[in-house]
Image (spheres, rainbow, N blue to C red):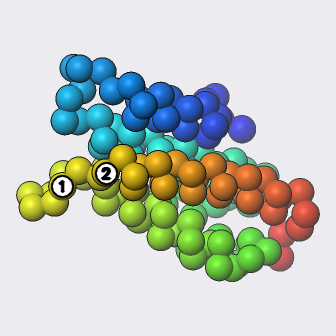
Amino acid sequence: MSATSAGELLDVARRLSAYPPADLAGRWPRAVALLTRQSLEIAIDDFWADRATAVAQSRAWRPKLLCLETYLKDPELGREINQLWAALSRACHVHAYELDPTIDELRGWMDAVTEVELQLRTDLTSTTAP
């Protein structure tokens, strides 16, 4: 388990999106996206720490994400997590001709991460490694 839980980090992201400080004007949407992605990464790392420690110790995210389809009871969940991580990663980076993520996109991603965290914990308690 991480020093900061996925839920705690997501709470910070929700507060930041609800009450963005003036000194983060124009930058808070990407900060929220980054906190949300980090929350997802913590949830994934916690899953791997309990399921396959060698995967958890990897610093590369592609293998961690790709292996989810094999280890999860529902392979579709692994694909959804992969897509969610990719969307959040894209939102974290500045692109010359793209707008910042909207508050609705951010809320959707935060809700999705909350659901993923719950599903990963549920999957851990209901199945064993292949």
Q: Label 1: which residue?
A: 99
Tell me the quadrant of the picture where the C terminus can be found.
Answer: bottom right
> Residue at horizontal 24%, vertical 26%?
24
Q: Is residue 20 left or right of residue 83?
A: left
From this viewpoint, which residue is outermost toward the left?
A: 96
Please determine whether, in this image, residue 19 is positioned above or below residue 57.
Answer: above
Q: In this view, does 35 lie to the left or right of 103?
A: right
The reply to whether discs 1 and 2 touch (Cβ–Cβ < 8 Å) is yes
Q: What residue type is labelled 2?
A: Thr
Picture quarter containing residue 127? bottom right
Q: Label 2: which residue?
A: 102
Q: How far apart are marks 1 and 2 (CA)?
A: 8 Å
Picture quarter containing residue 58? bottom right
Crowd tier of the residue under label 2, counting other residues whose Cα lies within 10 Å: few below 14, some 14–19, many 20 or above? few
Q: In this view, does 89 lie to the left or right of 83?
A: left
Please determine whether, in this image, residue 37 is positioned above or below residue 122.
Answer: above
Tell me the quadrant of the picture where the N terminus can be found.
Answer: top right
> Residue at horizontal 90%, vertical 63%?
126
Image coordinates of residue 19 in percent, x first then y, are 39, 25
Along the viewing direction, whichever of 22 and 113 lies nearer the viewer? 22
Q: Report if residue 45 is visible in the image.
A: no
Along the viewing direction, whichever of 106 and 81 lies nearer the viewer? 106
Along the viewing direction, whichever of 69 and 53 lies nearer the viewer? 69
Q: Which amino acid does label 1 sit on?
A: Leu
Please determine whether, in this image, residue 73 is positioned above or below residue 13.
Answer: below
Q: What element carries label 1?
A: loop
> Residue at horizontal 9%, vertical 58%?
96
Q: Is residue 35 left or right of residue 39?
A: left
Q: Report if residue 54 is visible in the image.
A: yes
Image coordinates of residue 108 in percent, x first then y, are 48, 55
Image coordinates of residue 69 in percent, x first then y, are 66, 77
Crowd tier of the residue under label 1, counting other residues whose Cα lies within 10 Å: few below 14, some 14–19, many 20 or above? few
